[in-house]
Amino acid sequence: MKDFVPVADGTKKLITLVGIFAAASILANVVATKIADLGLAFATVAILFYPITFIIDNTISEVWGKHIARRVVWTGLIANILMTFVFFISIRVPAAPFYDQQQAFEAVLGSVPRIALASIVAYSISQHLDIFLFLGIRKKTQGKHLWLRNNVSTWISQLIDTAIFTFVAFFGTIPLEEIWGIITTEYTLKILIAVLSTPIVYLMVSWARKQDTVSQAA
């Protein structure tokens, strides 16, 4: 029997980041069904978790390059499609006679498919745009100024993501002025999160590159 192939340190780190990326994107879609009162404005609870995907996406783009980053985005997309399918089937499986939580179950998970559809459309465009902008700026600056590409790529891609997601997810279910309010609030918070998360991206890139076992981006 052949021995197991040893896993390089860089590969283990990449697998960890991919797992967190997929989990964050799925969980953000589930909790996005709740619109929270943040005091001064309203926003989906997903605003607290979805930015994690862009932090990881930028880290992977910086360390592993375009092709791996795009594959990770597609992996997250497949995970969300699978989640939607599982929820769809779970809701339609007949409940046991003594199970009295079917309505609550449907209320929470029944709206997820629309949220997931909105997320899939916004995600597919914004995540690929983020990679394109991030690596484009990286090339223009000759690999310098990680803070610049992390913020600019996130600001632009998150604007597209927020607008598409909010309209597809909530158009026709809440007033239009509330939709614009959610877009404004969430985008403002995403800009703030991007700025505050810049040191985290530096730390993650440094962590991923340790021991020189990781293939650097071209």
Image: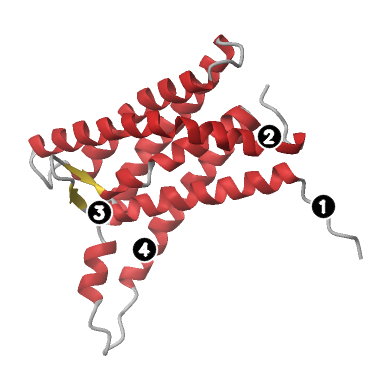
Q: Which mark is residue 6?
A: 1
Q: Residues within 10 Å of mark 4 (few under 14, many from 20)?
A: some
Distance of label 3 from label 2 (alpha carbons): 37 Å
Quarter assignment of residue 3: bottom right
Is 99 drawn above or below residue 88 in the view shown?
below
Camera-side residue: 75 or 184?
184
For the image shown, how many numbered marks are present on the structure? Answer: 4
Q: Which residue is mark 4?
A: 87
Q: Which mark is residue 33?
A: 3
Among the two numbered marks 4 and 2 on one chain, the one whose residue lies closer to the N terminus: 4
Circle 4 sits in a helix, a strand or a loop, which is it?
Answer: helix
Among the two numbered marks 1 and 3 on one chain, the one whose residue lies closer to the N terminus: 1
Amino acid type for the residue under numbered disc 2 = Arg
Whether residue 118 appears in this view of the structure is yes
Lateral position of residue 147 relative to residue 103, left or right: right
Circle 1 sits in a helix, a strand or a loop, which is it?
Answer: loop
Q: Which mark is residue 209?
A: 2
Q: Nearer the viewer, mark 1 or mark 2?
A: 2
Would you say the residues marked 1 and 2 are in contact, meaning their CB atoms lie under 8 Å apart?
no
Pinpoint residue 125: horizontal percent, then vertical percent. Answer: 40, 31
- Residue appearing at x 27%, y 84% in the figure: 99
Amino acid type for the residue under numbered disc 1 = Pro
Among the two numbered marks 4 and 1 on one chain, the one whose residue lies closer to the N terminus: 1
Amino acid type for the residue under numbered disc 3 = Thr
Q: Residues within 10 Å of mark 3 (few under 14, many from 20)?
A: many
